[in-house]
Amino acid sequence: MVPSQNASSILPAMQNLRTALIAANLNIPISTAVFQNVLASPFPPSAGTWHPDAVSIMVPLARLCIDEYLRGYCKLTDGALGYTNLLDASLDALYWALEKVGAPNVEIVVAETGWPSAGEGHDPATIDNARTYNSNLIKHGQFGTPKRLGKGLEAYIFALFNEDLKPRGSESHWGLFYPDMSEVYHVDF
């Protein structure tokens, strides 16, 4: 796999487009299409890795796309393709897969979900983003997903407490409370 001569222009073009959309106060997600050959090992899916020739292009693109999702889709605030958030899209994909194997009545429980409130160099790991995600999760959970409207979602927020014995960075900042039991941020249950 050899990247095309224009491949290195994709990231700057997407960044310029994003900057223009933000300046125009438009919340429109941006994306790009890629050929399957950017993967060195596409099967089985768990073995997926970037082709060595594509790493220098795909890693920065992936980081920009993650940031795009974090602008709203992941935080349960805005959407694309008929879904208002990534959580609903992921759950409905599981519901469809269950139906296809004859298990349409299996209920899904989200055992851990949350958002870090701090980290080292992780812009999305902020108290405001964590509060937004968890508050919206609580409000949203009662309505279900587009595939299962009206069927409440059973979900458990990770975590109750920040864990000061974990390594520094976002890993130790998922809690609603500090270890001394004071609130990191308030969420209405």
Image (tube, rainbow, N blue to C red):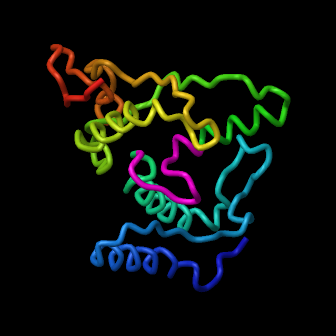
Give coordinates of residue 22: x percent, y percent. 31, 72
Give coordinates of residue 99: x percent, y percent. 79, 34
Relative side of 134 to 107, left or right: left
SS assignment for the magenta stretch, majority = loop
Foreground: 148 or 113?
148
Residue pictured at 67% horizontal, 42% vertical? 93
Quadrant holding the C terminus: top left
Foreground: 118 or 159?
159
Residue pictured at 69% horizontal, 35% vertical? 95
Q: Is residue 57 magenta?
A: no
Q: Is residue 82 magenta?
A: yes
Give coordinates of residue 17: x percent, y percent. 41, 78
Most extreme residue toward the front is: 150
Give coordinates of residue 181: x percent, y percent. 18, 14
Res 13 → quadrant? bottom left
Relative side of 3 to 179, left or right: right
Relative side of 102 to 143, left or right: right
State whether residue 32 is above or below residue 9: above
Task: Write the start and end of the magenta stretch as one range.
Answer: 76-89
Res 135 → quadrant? top left
Residue pictured at 27% horizontal, 22% vertical? 162
Res 90 → quadrant? top right
Residue pictured at 37% horizontal, 34% vertical? 139
Foreground: 61 or 184?
184
